[in-house]
Amino acid sequence: MAGNANKRSTIYFDENLHKVLRLKAAETHRTVSDLVNEAVRCSLLEDQEDLAAFEARESEPAISYEAMLKELKSSGTI
């Protein structure tokens, strides 16, 4: 990120989530903004990892749900 340009945004939290978020911020000596930014970064990183996994498995053969159920039944798994 070029510099540390922060943008302001209005976010509406569920009342109980906001309460626990404020408590966690106070307990960890961090700001609510820091906690929210960290959570968003983690979520985006998880999305990136999921997309990479999908891409890595792109060439694998696909099997339908029905075919998988038949295979599980014939093997005695279900």
Image (cartoon, rainbow, N blue to C red):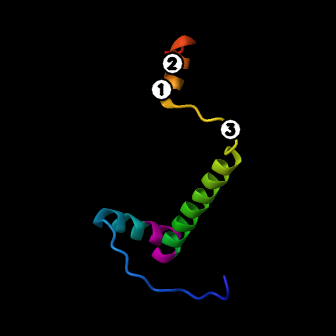
> Could you say where residue 45 lies in the image, as x and y percent from the top left?
61, 61
| In the depicted structure, whether residue 47 falls above or below residue 27 | above
Nearest to N terminus: mark 3 or mark 1: 3
In the image, is residue 27 part of the stretch drawn in magenta?
Answer: yes
**CA gap, disc 3 and disc 2:** 19 Å
- The residue under label 3 is 60
Q: Is mark 3 on a helix, strand or loop?
A: loop
SS majority, magenta: helix
Amino acid type of the residue tagged 2 in the rendering: Lys
> Could you say where residue 23 lies in the image, as x and y percent from the top left?
41, 67
Give the residue at x 46% y 74%. 32
Q: Check contact, mark 3 vs mark 2: CB within 8 A.
A: no
Which residues are drawn in magenta?
24-33
Q: Is mark 1 on a helix, strand or loop?
A: helix
Q: Give the number of the disc on residue 70.
A: 2
Amino acid type of the residue tagged 3 in the rendering: Glu
- The residue under label 1 is 66
> Could you say where residue 19 lies in the image, as x and y percent from the top left?
34, 67
Q: Could you tell me if residue 29 is visible in this image?
A: no
The quadrant of the picture occupied by the N terminus is bottom right
> Could you say where residue 50 lies in the image, as x and y percent from the top left?
61, 52
Nearest to N terminus: mark 3 or mark 2: 3
**Nearest to the observer: residue 7 or residue 23:** 7
